[in-house]
Amino acid sequence: MTKVPAEQIVERLQSVVTTGKVLTDADALQAYGSDWTKKFSPNPLAIVLPKTTEEVQAVVLAANELGFGLVPSGGRTGLSAGAVAANGEVVVAFDNMNQILDFNSADRTVLCQAGVVTEQLQNFAKDNQLYYPVDFASAGSSQLGGNLSTNAGGIKVIRWGMSRDWVAGLRVVTGKGDILELNKDLVKNNTGYDLRHLFIGAEGTLGFITEATMKLTRQPNNLTVLVLGLSHFNHVMDVMQTFSNKLDLTAFEFFSHQAMEHVLEHADIPRPFDSEAPYYALLEFECLTEDMLDDAMGLFETCVENEWVVDGVISQSETQAINLWRLREGISESIAPHTPYKNDISVVPSKVPEFLVRIDEIVSKEYPDFEIIWFGHIGDGNLHLNILKPKDLPKEEFFKRCEQVNTMVFETVEAFRGSVSAEHGVGLLKKDYLQYTRSQEELAYLKAIKQVFDPNNVMNPGKVIDL
């Protein structure tokens, strides 16, 4: 992107990041230039770790002046290559902007720098008898700026929504180098376009989020977990409707038997029950009274009587609830050694059973020698399709074969009016498939918005949308 010598860029970065760091050693370039995707090789020019919004601004202004690209880096847990620096960009890592700056107990808001780790915010809320409900398996390493830049969802969306729903205000540095204060933490602010929501989910292509005021809520009480063995996946919506008509569910997840077997092999977790089922549903709810527990048991019996469920278990302690959750949350880690090819797709919840059957038919026919792993968030219509690489197949050939069927998968997504990326973002992996979810008119507007905020295309160039 730039014709300016690398040495000149590094010198400029060192001159503007006076309290932060600039790294150029091979280990740092490798570590900070990639995320959890394995398709692209990192090739950053340098890593800069600013400590203030003003230092981020200085880096952005330097990028515009000298003509080099910037890639944001948080916890590097992304699954769409949105944080991969593969073309000589400078990585802006937010690890050193990791402070909780302020807390307002009356408003239930907390001001965080972008590098605050999700679990750090969750623990802060808990220490103050409050709750931050956005949660996912990578909570121990993912950073708030990355969560907001991809509008991360996770396992509690059915009750508490996406990351977007918990943002009271943002401080951002645009692609031009302007610092904007967005919404001023107001509950009501009906004064035109709400620019917060352009930056949430933009993957750093319009500018970088440096601070966020996050909303908190009350702590849930006595979260209780059920794991149910489904006789057939077609019954998943019957089970969900039966329980949600009587209980306010905080989660409704599913996973295949193959997915659970990988978790049990990988970790020391007890099997939920002796019976086997092709699919499992995990439900969570606040059990506030004995009557609610009785209701849950009655609903379970109804599902068994209708032959939707073959067996089940309900948590009797916090430890058991944690172990039941590990059956779901441990899937990604347990299959990681198999270099999974991931698809993160969604439809409206009512269409999930038919949609999964259609997609499963496609991938099973095209990949009879590959293991297919399904899991996801049934409550919000989000399915995670994972194709595992055989041991003796080179990674490059495996990815090439998987990509050959993408068109069929995404044509089915389009036919069901779904999304090719439910919560993982677009990055490099999904950019070529946006037309299956977005119209040509929408894509033109996206490009126009990018042009306004980042006219020189320095902010995460090549991701999401091209100028």
Image (cartoon, rainbow, N blue to C red):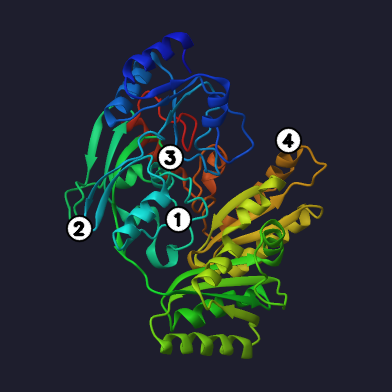
Q: For the residue carrying disc 1, how many other residues have a C-alpha within 10 Å: few (<14), some (14-19), or many (20+)? A: many
How far apart, in angstroms, are the residues tagged by discs 1 and 2? 23 Å
* 3D distance between C-alphas at marks 2 and 4: 51 Å
**Residue 390 vertical position relative to residue 72 in the rendered view, above or below:** below
Q: Earlier in the sequence, mark 2 or mark 4?
A: 2
Tell me the quarter of the image containing the C terminus. top left
Mark 1, mark 2: which one is toward the viewer? 2
Q: x and y percent of residue 373 in the render?
A: 68, 58
Identified by mark 2, the residue type is Asp
Q: Position of residue 318 (x, y in %)?
A: 49, 71
Mark 4 packing: few (<14 Cα in 10 Å), some, or many (20+)? few
The residue tagged 3 is 203
Q: Tag 3's secondary structure?
A: loop
Cα separation between marks 3 and 4: 26 Å
Residue to which mark 1 is pinned: 153
- Horizontal arrangement in the rendering, residue 291 relative to residue 367 (left or right): left
| Element marked by disc 4 | helix
* 174, above or below 254, in the image: above
Q: Is residue 428 left or right of residue 114?
A: right
Residue 107 badge: 2
Q: Which mark is first along the chain, 2 or 3?
A: 2
